């Protein structure tokens, strides 16, 4: 039965939910305080990450924990003042590093990631922007032979889940990417992954597709959510929006809206930065992930986008782009990128302690649905999340078991 639905948040996840709900005949309003895809969905590394099935909460984290907590590396930067607020999250995060839990979580990520490329290719075609999606895979590279050897478990996980990859030695890396300096001991080419040359433009095109399907886009700052009778009321700075159903897809800003309803969603911002640089004389053919130095370098329409690992800090705290400063010399060792172009950007990955997204109805709150918590994979998983969420809201059955992503796991 078609319904009047309001989707809160026009990031990649909310836009895709809105499209798929509209496709199923619902009357859909998509609400955001900004233009579509201007927050985290704008500045990411653009990888449709088939192959990134290893949960962040991995058994290996214990070996790296002292290094991480002392802010010694480039992959994590912790604001120490934020540590007391992070502690409950970290406790749950560490509980998910146990091998059986990690293996189960990897399977649940894989069940979604399997659809990342095909769903984006279909949507990008429909939106008339297929040129933004390139199907050349991406490279995961190791500088030291010891780190490469330690990644054998990751390789086994990829093989177990049928992820396509090619093992690379230094000669194969040089043949594939002549732009790279010969500093890598080896790595893997995740051949089935795709990349987006302008994630913001992709999100904008999807939002236009939604509008073209008869969807309504509104700009408003959401302030509160309450249930009155059998209707949900969304309070905004521009007045009230009422709907039979509400989908909350506010990324890292989701928990604050739900807390007054008595539902504590353990989603934290894992902040990340980017900066664009002028291209090198010899171009890269695909993004590279330098695993030990904790950065991704991705050729984009606006320059070479250097993206950082995780910063654990308060949502809205002033930017501290230390990781960019630390990784730039390491990135230049790999590829001779030129001068910076434009400003430094900061985004907020909405991360859950089990590194699985939250897709489903809020316990005890009928007709209030969540599509959030996509962490490092929200660009990749937007379209499949939209399909699954719109399907379950519309009473369709699904081939994908949705229980691993249920909001009720956090009660
Ligand atoms: C450095 C970096 C690199 C990344 N690389 C990749 C990658 O290569 N591949 C990948 O798959 N993922 C990547 N990610 C992760 C990905 O970008 C996120 O998971 C994804 O963008 C989350 O999408 P979202 O729609 O949930 O949230 P967002 O894009 O953050 O959207 C949330 C929306 O809610 C709106 N909003 C918030 N509060 C309010 C309010 N009160 N009222 C109205 N509107 C509100 C915001 O304006 C925003 O538009 C990366 C992230 C970072 C930071």
Image (spheres, helix red, strand yellow):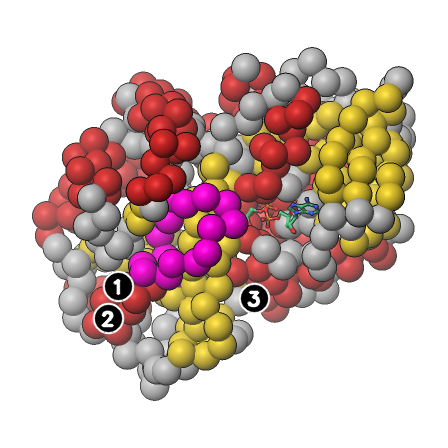
Task: Indicate yes or no whether the magenta region holds residue 315.
Answer: yes
> Which residue ends up furthest to the front in the rendered image?
81
Judging by the rendered image, the residue that carries numbered circle 3 is 198
Q: Residue 329 carries which label?
A: 2
Judging by the rendered image, the residue that carries numbered circle 1 is 326
* The magenta segment: 307-323
Considering the numbered disc 1 on the image, is that residue within a helix, a strand or a loop? helix
Q: Magenta residues: mostly which secondary structure?
A: loop
Residue lying at 82% horizontally and 52% vertically, measured from the top left: 217
Q: Which of marks 1 and 3 is in front?
A: 1
Q: Tags 2 and 1 in contact by the CB under 8 Å rule?
A: yes
Location of residue 252 (image quadrant)? top right
Q: How many marks?
A: 3
Residue lying at 59% horizontally and 55% vertically, measured from the top left: 39
Between 53 and 15, the one nearer to me in the picture: 15
Q: Which part of the image, by quadrant, shows the C terminus?
A: top right
| 3D distance between C-alphas at marks 1 and 3 | 25 Å
């Amino acid at each position: 039965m078609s319904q009047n639905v309001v989707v809160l948040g026009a990031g990649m996840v909310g836009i895709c939910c809105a499209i798929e709900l509209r496709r199923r005949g619902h009357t859909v309003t998509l609400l955001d305080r900004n233009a579509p895809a201007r927050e985290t969905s704008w500045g990411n590394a653009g990888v449709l990450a088939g192959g990134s099935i290893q949960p962040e909460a991995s058994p290996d984290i214990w070996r790296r924990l002292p290094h991480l907590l002392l802010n010694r590396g480039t992959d994590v930067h912790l604001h120490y003042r934020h540590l007391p607020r992070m502690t409950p999250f970290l406790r749950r995060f560490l509980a998910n590093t146990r091998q059986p839990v990690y293996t189960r979580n990897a399977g649940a990520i894989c069940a979604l990631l399997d659809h990342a490329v095909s769903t984006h290719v279909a949507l990008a075609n429909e939106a008339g922007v297929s040129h933004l999606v390139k199907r050349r895979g991406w490279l995961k590279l190791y500088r030291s032979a010891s780190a490469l050897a330690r990644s054998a478990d990751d390789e086994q996980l990829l093989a177990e889940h049928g992820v396509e990859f090619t093992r690379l030695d230094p000669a194969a890396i040089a043949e594939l990417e002549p732009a790279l300096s010969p500093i890598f001991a080896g790595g893997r080419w995740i051949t089935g992954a795709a990349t987006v040359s302008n994630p913001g433009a992709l999100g904008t095109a999807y939002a236009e597709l939604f509008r073209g399907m008869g969807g309504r886009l509104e700009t408003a700052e959401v302030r509160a959510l309450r249930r009155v009778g059998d209707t949900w009321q969304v309070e905004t700075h521009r007045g009230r929006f009422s709907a039979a159903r509400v989908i909350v897809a506010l990324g890292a800003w989701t928990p604050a809206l739900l807390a007054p309803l008595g539902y504590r969603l353990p989603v934290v911002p894992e902040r990340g930065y980017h900066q664009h640089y002028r291209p090198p004389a010899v171009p890269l053919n695909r993004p590279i992930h330098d695993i030990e130095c904790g950065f991704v370098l991705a050729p984009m329409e606006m320059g070479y986008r250097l993206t950082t690992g995780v910063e654990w800090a308060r949502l809205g705290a002033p930017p501290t782009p230390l990781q960019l400063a630390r990784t730039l010399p390491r990135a230049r060792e790999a590829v001779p990128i030129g001068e910076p172009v434009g400003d430094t950007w900061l985004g907020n990955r909405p991360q859950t302690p089990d590194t699985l997204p939250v897709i489903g109805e809020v316990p005890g709150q009928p007709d209030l649905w969540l599509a959030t918590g996509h962490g490092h994979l929200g660009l990749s998983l937007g379209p499949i999340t939209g399909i699954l969420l719109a399907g379950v809201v519309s009473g369709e059955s699904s081939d994908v078991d949705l229980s691993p992503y249920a909001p009720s796991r956090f009660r």
